[in-house]
């Protein structure tokens, strides 16, 4: 039966009852459902489908279908308007597989790996499998599957109307019983599903000891971020309330919230921002302008006044007290404002950001957002393999590192500023190129030319060149002296045979002093021991004394 699975569409799903009965021989019960499944199997075997042969380099289409019991896959090729099946796969879900998310079950089609290696594959699906595989918050299992699929040329394409009889079992990718849970899962995994409102509680306090701010931000998932701030400048109670509101709106905008509901216990501040009260004091007018400018950055911002009892947590943070109603340990950072927010100049609308044009991130962003690949097939395959390790969050590109934290990808302009700050900034240590790369990674940044850029930065640093240790090494390698004083050690050699010269001399006897490099040579007709002794006596011993050592290879 396993061998027939490549010829029968959805074998494990259609005949699930039949196989389940055969797996339990002890409690064997032949039911009408098993009998019906057996007759259908016999009828299907009498009219088997005609499988096609894949053409070399042809694009193959992949259709998937998921039910409660199995995952079915068909690999086909198009010939005009015809769909020719090549291979059927039907995998029965084990007990552990049934607990996978429904979108994860679509990624189980890995048995067709030999076809993936030889052909471009177009996965036809109506569900965002590609977005799920490239999301920042992805499970270990999906991350592993994404790396495996990134090796092959797999493109995801939305499904269209199917009219072919071959694809009759793949019209619906999921069985009707799974659709309610699937819709809920797609809604939870989508990045654009955040229709709820973030909750922000703010409060300010001013006394003789100074001014304090309290912020409590609650996300859509129920996670809470608390902040306690202290102002190092004099501020009235109303000014501290405005400072708390502005700091809370700034924090919420940085977290990426689009809809927000603000709660505060100051009747004056809430009504002034809503336009019900008029601000007459100069400082109140300035604070009101800053708050309204921040509110325009949100799609929706509702402000509500609540009693102080309902705002106790923000009030406790503002008073820097211990009135927090919690039994667990909490770590609340204390931030210090050095100047009022009204002193900051509002951004001018006429100033535009400097665009760098296309960088090394542009092909990856185009592929992840719009599935656009370079025209060159080799470059396209390279981008698809690299994109497995990248994801986009809040319109920024991130890279998965080996230790699992995400590294923010930097442009060449940003990379230059990062290296300068890490090397010679306030916390810079003028470290070497390798240490500078490690510091940049620990800071959460990545770009492909980190090592080369770090080496260039360290070599061009003026302070590093001025205060670097002076090298005492000679410009050339030291050469050892083989003789401690002149004419102590000699080298002797016989060269020849040369062409005969007058006197029938064909050999040359040469001696050299190792220390002074003094050379003496004489032509000989024969090389006998008497002639060599005579030569040494005449030119070496009588002139420089008896040598301590004579080196020769003869």
Image: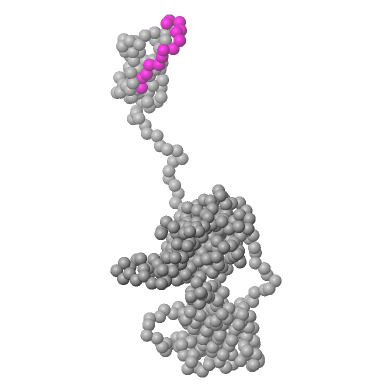
Visible in this render: residue 462? no
User: Left or right: 475 with respect to 60?
Assistant: left
Magenta stretch bounds: 491-504
User: Left or right: 263 with respect to 322?
Assistant: right
Residue in the picture at 36% in, 70% down: 30
Q: Which residue ends up furthest to the top in the rendered image?
A: 503
Chief SS of the magenta region: strand
Q: Where is residue 346 in the image (x, y as percent from the top left)?
A: 64, 76
Applied colour scheme:
one colour
Q: Assign the C terminus to one quadrant of the image.
A: top left
Q: Does the magenta stretch include residue 503?
A: yes
Residue in the picture at 37% in, 34% down: 480
Q: Position of residue 287 (x, y in %)?
A: 61, 84
Residue sitting nearer the eye, 272 or 365: 365
Visible in this render: residue 484? yes
Residue in the picture at 50% in, 53% down: 115
So how many labels did they put on this image? 0
Q: Is residue 354 magenta?
A: no
Residue sitting nearer the eye, 487 or 308: 308
Q: Where is residue 438 in the image (x, y as percent from the top left)?
A: 45, 59
Residue in the picture at 47% in, 94% down: 309
Is 350 located above or below residue 461 in the figure? Answer: below
Q: Where is residue 381 in the image (x, y as percent from the top left)?
A: 55, 54
The picture quadrant where one finds residue 538 is top left
The picture quadrant where one finds residue 125 is bottom right
Is 464 located above or below residue 171 in the figure? Answer: above
Q: Assign the N terminus to one quadrant of the image.
A: bottom left
Residue sitting nearer the eye, 141 or 174: 174
Is 63 located above or below residue 553 in the figure? Answer: below
């Amino acid at each position: 039966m396993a061998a027939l699975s490549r010829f029968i569409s959805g074998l494990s799903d259609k005949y699930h009852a039949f196989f389940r009965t055969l797996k339990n021989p002890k409690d064997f019960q032949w039911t009408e459902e098993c009998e019906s499944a057996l007759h259908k199997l016999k009828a299907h075997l009498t009219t088997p489908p005609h499988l096609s042969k894949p053409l070399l380099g042809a694009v193959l289409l992949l259709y998937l279908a998921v039910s409660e019991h199995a995952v079915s896959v068909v690999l086909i090729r198009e010939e005009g308007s015809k769909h020719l099946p090549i291979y059927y796969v039907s995998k029965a879900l084990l007990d552990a597989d049934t607990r996978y998310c429904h979108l994860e079950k679509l990624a189980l089609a890995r048995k067709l790996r030999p076809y993936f290696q030889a052909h471009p594959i177009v996965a036809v699906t109506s569900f965002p499998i590609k977005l799920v595989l490239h999301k920042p918050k992805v499970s270990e299992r999906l991350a592993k599957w994404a790396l495996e699929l990134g090796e092959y040329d797999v493109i995801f394409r939305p499904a269209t109307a199917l009219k072919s009889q071959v694809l009759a079992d793949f019209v619906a990718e999921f069985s009707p019983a799974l659709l309610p849970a699937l819709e809920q899962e797609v809604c939870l995994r989508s990045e654009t599903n955040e229709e709820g409102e973030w909750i922000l509680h703010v409060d300010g306090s001013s006394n003789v000891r100074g001014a304090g701010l309290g912020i409590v931000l609650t996300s859509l998932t129920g996670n809470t971020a608390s902040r306690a701030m202290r102002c190092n400048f004099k501020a009235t109670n109303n000014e501290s309330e405005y400072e708390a509101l502005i700091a809370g709106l700034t924090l919420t905008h940085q977290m990426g919230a689009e809809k927000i509901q603000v709660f505060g216990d100051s009747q004056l501040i809430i009504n002034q921002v809503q336009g019900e009260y008029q601000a007459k004091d100069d400082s109140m007018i300035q604070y009101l302008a800053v708050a309204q400018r921040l509110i325009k950055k949100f799609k929706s911002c509702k402000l509500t006044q609540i009693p102080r009892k309902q705002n106790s947590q923000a009030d406790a943070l503002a008073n820097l007290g211990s009135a927090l109603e919690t039994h667990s340990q909490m770590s609340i950072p204390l931030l210090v404002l050095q100047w009022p927010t009204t002193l900051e100049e509002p951004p001018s609308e006429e100033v535009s950001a400097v665009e760098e044009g296309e960088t090394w991130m542009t092909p990856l962003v185009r592929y992840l957002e719009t599935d656009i690949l370079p025209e060159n097939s080799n470059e396209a395959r390279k981008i698809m393999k690299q994109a497995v390790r990248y994801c986009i969050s809040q319109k920024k590109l991130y890279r998965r590192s080996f230790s699992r934290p995400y590294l923010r990808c930097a442009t060449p302009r940003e990379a230059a500023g990062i290296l300068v700050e890490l090397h010679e900034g306030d916390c810079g240590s003028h470290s070497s190129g390798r240490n500078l790369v490690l510091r940049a990674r620990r800071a959460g940044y990545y770009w492909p030319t980190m090592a080369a850029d770090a080496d260039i930065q360290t070599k061009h640093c003026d302070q590093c060149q001025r205060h670097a240790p002076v090298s005492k090494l000679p410009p050339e390698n030291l050469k050892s002296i083989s003789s401690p004083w002149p004419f102590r050690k000699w080298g002797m050699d016989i060269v020849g045979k040369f062409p005969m010269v007058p006197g029938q001399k064909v050999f040359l006897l040469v001696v050299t002093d190792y220390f002074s490099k003094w050379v003496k040579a004489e032509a000989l007709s024969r090389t006998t021991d008497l002639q060599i002794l005579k030569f040494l006596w005449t030119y070496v011993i009588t002139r420089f004394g008896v040598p301590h050592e004579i080196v020769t290879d003869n």
